[in-house]
Image: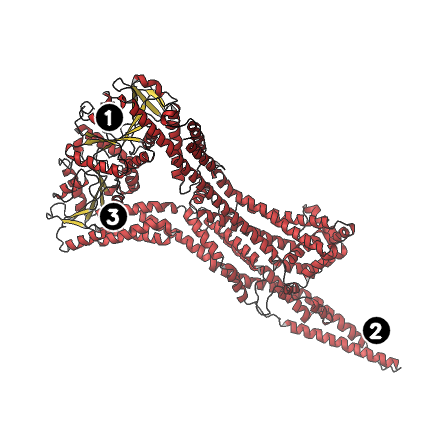
Amino acid sequence: MRRARADLGQRIDALSRAVELAPADDLVAAARTVLARSAARRSLAPERTVVALAGGTGSGKSTLFNRLVQADLAPTGVRRPMTSRSRAAVWPSLGDKDDAEDAARLLDWLEVRDRHWVDSAAELAGLVLIDLPDYDSTVAEHRVEAERMAAVADLLVWVVDPQKYADAALHERYLRPLASHRDVMMVVLNQADRLAGSEVDACVRHLGRLLAEDGLAGAPVVATSAVQGAGLDALCGALVGRVRTTRASVERLHADIDAVVADLAPLCGPVREGGRRTREADEGFLAALERAAGVPAVAAAAAGQYRRDAQRSVGWPLTRWVARLRPDPLRRVRVAAARLSVPTAGAGIQRAQIANAVRDLADAHTSGLPDGWGSAVRAQTDRQGNELPAALARAVSEATPPGPRRPRWWAGARAVHTLFLVVAAAGAVWLATLAVLGYLRLSPPTPHLGRLTLPTVLLIGGLVAGLLVALLLRPVVAWGARRRRAAVAASLSAAVRAAGRRHVLVPLSDRLDDQRRFCAAVQTAARRR
Amino acid sequence: MTADAGLSPHVLSAVREMREAAFGVRLDLDTAGAVAGRRLQGELVGQLDDYVLPRLEQQGAPLLVVVGGSTGAGKSTLVNTLVGVSVSPAGVLRPTTRSPVLVLNPADAGWFGDDRLLPGLIRVLAGGRDPVDRAGVLQVTTVQTLPSGLALLDAPDIDSVVESNRELARQLLAAADVWLFVTTAARYADAVPWELLRVARERSTALAVVLDRVPAEALTEVSDHLRQLLDREGLAESELLIVPEAQLDGGRLPDTAVAPVRHWIDALAADAGARAELMRRTLRGAVDSLQVRAASLAGAVEEQERAAGELGGDLDSAYVSARSIVAREVDDGTLLRGEVLSRWQEFLGTGQFMRTVESGMGRLRDRITSAFTGRAPASPVEEALENNLEALLQDAVERAAGAAADAWSGRAEGRRLLQAAGQDLSRAARETLADIPGVVRAWQADVLELVTAEGGDRRRVARLASYGVNGAGSLLIVGLFAHTGGLTGGEVAIAGGTAAVSQRVLEAIFGDQAVRTLADKAREGLLTRFDEVLAADSARFRALLEPAVPLPGTAARLRAAARAVRAAQ
């Protein structure tokens, strides 16, 4: 018994885990009800057995009840319907002194007010027998009451008679939905005295076939005559068997869990394992985010800015003025001097690009998932995708552009340029002076370098050397610009990817983990003993 | 004969018309009233075919007494006892009777041919070689012991697990001139029989209730109680015949037990006037009930029409809002921002544009490239713009599909349609998405054509050609987006005057007014092409909806038929 109890506890724990992880609340409403009911029933005299006599009007439930209690408690009669309220008879259980209180609490929970305390402990000790109103008369309240009790009793005894045993109301409305409750169900064919001996057997066999069609093959069928007393011993014996084990309440909860777990099983189709395809989808998603955030554009703009700055700093001084006429590429994409921000790809376009990327990602991850999960995961991912535009903007604006904006060698190159310019200027001044002196017919001796005069060499050499330096620096600047482009792209894409992971990929994989855990929980809950 | 029932001859044609109208009704959407509506339609058409039309055509036929009731109530035993022959098997296994048994005097046999009452059931003579216990069969037995002028029909049960029995019993009861409704002391308060008794009251069907298997000690109490119940349900006029529980002798009740029923039958058989009166009453009741039933069937059709309208409206609003998203984005020029402007700037800034303009190289390059690739090369500007447009259109279609699927899921009938589709419609169709790049390129081609058409005069064409086809295309497209809604002054300045430049260039070529017209035309062209994309995608939903929409005019035809029946009376 201890083992069985622990086992029920495990199933309940697993089921509540599954309920918490479920993709949508409405899918687990029935499971919630079962959990609430099992919590209540397990705390209320679980060793007692609540047996409910359910059946159509006129089948003899109350007569049977009176025979089992051996007292005329329930009014019986020919008027239909007869019984309108549930009525309980409580047998004391063996050797428990708080027994009456426990039983009273149990009956409070069952909402049965008519109670009778049976004196003899005897063999049915621990039984709570309940006579229910009918489920098939014109009085709708009876049906409501009968259905309420049928949902909470530990053992259901369906009382039928030769007229009514094949009624659609019984089979379609009650027995078929309770197919998983076979072990906590018995069927009594009452009023057997109305049939001849051979007819009783034929009837019982036919009833057995109908039960099999309902999915209840093997449910015990007892033929009785409450009026004449035939078959009552067999019924009593069957009840004693159930009551003695004191397991009926546990069995009923097991059956309830079986039913809801069977409903949850379709949500547990194939479990997705991260494979190459989903990794590619993740990568495609992050790359799409980079494009949407304008990372390539900003990086290109940063490289352009670098080239322009380089042109200003280390270009040939005489041509620098050209650079001043060019627009600032970073300003164009609205990046502040110190911080980079998303080039405003119109908000609508960016939202569209991001939404497309999120959809592709969700589709790749949810293809093949059971319906309930697929739509839940997609909806959640789409929702999180809506946060992305703002998150990306933040990520990009907070990313620090790497490296000093003006490399040190620019100063050196500038100094060299200045030096050559000074040399050239010196040559020019010297030549001008010589020209003035020559006009005045004064020709001071001029130093020669080879065939050229020194000032000429200074002027031409200074200019040529400056140009040469500028030419030599060009590939260096281009290389620097490429590095800058790569560095900016790397830092921005790191920021964008981090945001994409945080806002979408991580919650997505968490939710997919939820599905795995849900399936594991459902499997645990499905396992019986 | 029709005069007998106090019904004018026009009634027959009006009822025929109603039958056709009701038969043509299709209730394929799963609205709240659909299940009830379908049942109503089946019952209405069934009763017209089985009973009202044959009865209107020939009222001299014997009175048809249908013996119906719960399983195990003893219907077959009662019939066997009344005619003194075992015509219908009785037993303890439920349900016993599966195919109905018609018992009549040989003199009346001619009245129950295949084309008379209940034409849908195949007549099989009892004792013949044909298998009798199967669906769609009516066993016919002639006995001398039953007086001429009325026929007994032993119907299957109304409440057992065998569904076909329940349906057949309802069909037979709808075809009855008189119901002989059998219940028992154990069953008389069951819910199912009372539902049927209420139907009898609503249709003013002549009714006699047999309370069978009454234990002697319960006789007074039970019969009084049942009488009270009948009074309370407005069935006070119906006969209550009591048959006490008795030991069966050879499968039959003792004659004393069934005396009240036998007396009732003999009295009817002897009194042609009483029979005609019952027949008239039931027929009138049935015809009277037609108006209400046709009206509520018309109501069910209208409900379907409304639901279909709402589902269609959901599609319209989802896809129209997708169109307006695109229109808005085009109008406010956001397509141009970011990438496109950068590329445009590069295009101009790097002098590519100017070189293209000055050297006429663009044209040459276009020719060479297209000779190799078969497609005009796209400039970076166009590529960026293309990407933006494609992303925008794709997102808009996806949003529309999602919104439409959401809206449908919010309605029971829409949910059912989506489930029936067997595929997830909340994402746009792959084919639709695959079409989008083609649509964008086709639109670009449209724009170029517009430009060529507009620049009709030779000098303009020559100047245009000097920009190269791509140059001009980019020029116009950028100009279009800058023009239609435009960038703010600041942005134009940021763009280094590029949009303004393109605008000026365009205006220089075409003139101010022409540029405006061109821009409007290009915008309309884009939206028109996008409408086709949306229509293709929403067609998936419409393909589900359209077969389920009721044919137009069905409800009106039914109502007209109901009015015609009333007028004919």
Instruction: Inspect this view and state whether residue B89 appears.
Output: no
Q: Which residue appears farthest toward the left when viewing the image?
A: A120
The residue sitting at 14% across, 42% down in the picture is A66
Q: List x then y, in percent, for residue A415.
A: 68, 75
Q: Which residue is mark 2?
A: A451
- Mark 3 residue type: Val
- Mark 1 residue type: Trp
Helix, strand or loop status at disc 3? helix
Quadrant of res B417: top left
> Are labels 3 and 1 on one chain?
no
Give the numbered dot on residue A152.
3
Determine whether label 1 and label 2 are within 8 Å by CB.
Answer: no
Give the numbered dot on residue B566.
none
Quadrant occupied by the N terminus of chain B = top left
Q: Residues within 10 Å of mark 1 (few under 14, many from 20)?
A: few
- Mark 2 residue type: Arg
Viewer-nearest of labels 3 and 1?
A: 1
Q: Earlier in the sequence, mark 2 or mark 3?
A: 3
Q: Which residue is mark 1?
A: B264
